[in-house]
Amino acid sequence: MSSSGQALTGISDPKPALAMPVPTGVMAETGKTRQPWSREAVPPARAPLGVETARIEKKSILAVSATVTDPSDLKQTGWGVLFASDADPAIKAQLQPLLDLRKNQVGSDKLFQVFEGAASGVRPKQSAGNWAAARGVSAVAPIDPTRGVPFYLLIVGSLDRIPYEFQALLDLQWAVGRLHFDKLEDYGAYAKSIVQYETAKTIAGKKRVAMWMPKNPMDGATPMLHATIAPGFMGQTDGGKKLGSAQGFELLSYLAEGQATKANLKELLTGATTGGAASIIFTASHGGEWPMSNPEVQRAKQGALVTQEWTYGQPLEPQHYFAAEDLPDTANLQGSIIFHFACFGCGCPAQDNFFKTNDNKPIQLAPSPLVSQLPQKLLSKGALAVIGHVDRAFSYGFQDEAGTPQPQLLRSPLELLMQGKRAGEAMDPMNLQWSSLAAIIGLQTGGFGTEPPPEVLANLIVARDDARNYMLLGDPAVRLRIQDLQ
């Protein structure tokens, strides 16, 4: 996480007053955080991919074509599910109630699509661009759902079978989510819960949004989270409004000294809070990083949320974090959407996206890429969707590469969700951020002026990849029943 709050002095300045990026996340065995990037760690700035810059070049708010007048209307946008070509048919059977619901809502065989098997499923090592081209559509043009690929796409499969890069690139144009569970029956539990929530005559949800944000002793990152995010979310900036106030949401905050505890997070995630459950839950914290020397422990705990009980330098013990095992089997999260700002909050790649060994070789993080178990369990217990990071989280979700506070980058998806937008729509600010930064890097390293100094380039590269690494788990077409919330 970049610890500098000083402004850029210009890309031609040979000694810009800018710190190197510092990541969040706590290494479980040592209780320490990763060190900042060094000058030597700055990778060569690759040329931006056309799909990365297409959004910002077209200056479109959503990548759906102008023929769609309401991007929330499935009858206009369509909906599709995308399986691996060799997916277990039992997974589709578990999801069938959700597929039937969406087919009925779309109301058109042309706009409802199931991509599966050798004919249209994702083949091993197939790229997003190649898959799109095989369907006769472009990965860089505005999406016309009538051409055969609907705007809302649910990817079903593991990260090692359908890589995260596939999802991220597709998500720049389409509204994309993913489902992957370790247990077959969890697909059925998720599908059943979504159908129940969307078809029930009444629901028990409330217009409540919750913020849970530890401020750990001796730590540098979490106090920065507080100083940058909390004032904006709490309406303490000039002319500011509290998060959700424009939509009539009550804000429940766990920000004060000693409030962002493990016990209070358990209350939030089980709906046991006084006054009723929150429909939107936002957490901002460190995520735990376990070594792959014990794959079973890593699989169970990677990305667990580090709570107020932890102090910098303490190896992570069970009382210091909230993992999947801490969510009771009796939990009922139906009708909630959860956003975790934390390292590995939604998943972990096999190789580190940001750091390399001293001899410039990739660092292996896990035996294979994984979807974190905490969001898996939240979804299996009724959560509509979970938003979070694959790999490490950096400060660029709430400040720019110069260290200037920009809490609206995290706030925008939350406000869109509270307006009743579908989850895939609410993720779009992250995609625009990625596309913008990719375009900036391309301009500054492609002969348009002087190439920026290493510190500036490092911050831009990390900011770009940080924006790319957000992932939506769950059906991208889910949304809160705003009109029915109490």
Image (cartoon, rainbow, N blue to C red):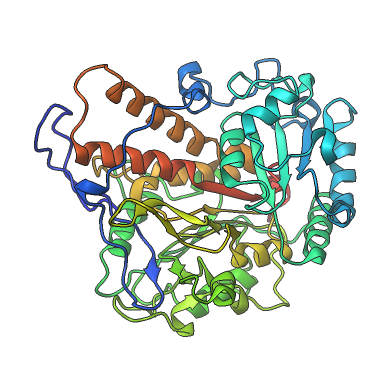
Kindly identify the residue that appears in the image at 27 percent across and 48 percent down: 41
The image shows residue 222 at horizontal and vertical percentages of: 32, 64
Q: Residue at x 29, y 78 (%)?
A: 313
What residue appears at the point 79 percent right and 43 percent down from the top-left corner? 85
Q: Position of residue 416 (x, y in %)?
A: 56, 40
Q: Is residue 460 above or below residue 374?
A: above
| Residue that extends furthest to the front in the rendered view of this protein | 359
Whether residue 421 is visible here, answered yes or no, is no
Residue 245 in view here: yes
In the shown orientation, is residue 317 left or right of residue 378? left
The N terminus appears in which quarter of the rendering?
bottom left
Q: Where on the picture, by quarter, is residue 435? A: top left
In the rendered image, which quarter is residue 214 located in?
bottom left
- In this view, the residue in front, 94 or 43, is 43
Residue 372 falls left or right of residue 259: right
Q: Is residue 399 above or below residue 146?
A: below
Place of residue 417 in the rendered image (x, y in percent of width and height, measured from the top left)? 59, 44
Q: Residue 45 appears at what percent x and percent y? A: 33, 33
Q: Is residue 44 above or below residue 307?
A: above
Q: Nearer the viewer, residue 379 or 184?
A: 184
Quadrant of the drawing holding the C terminus = bottom right
Indicate whether 383 appears above or below 152: below
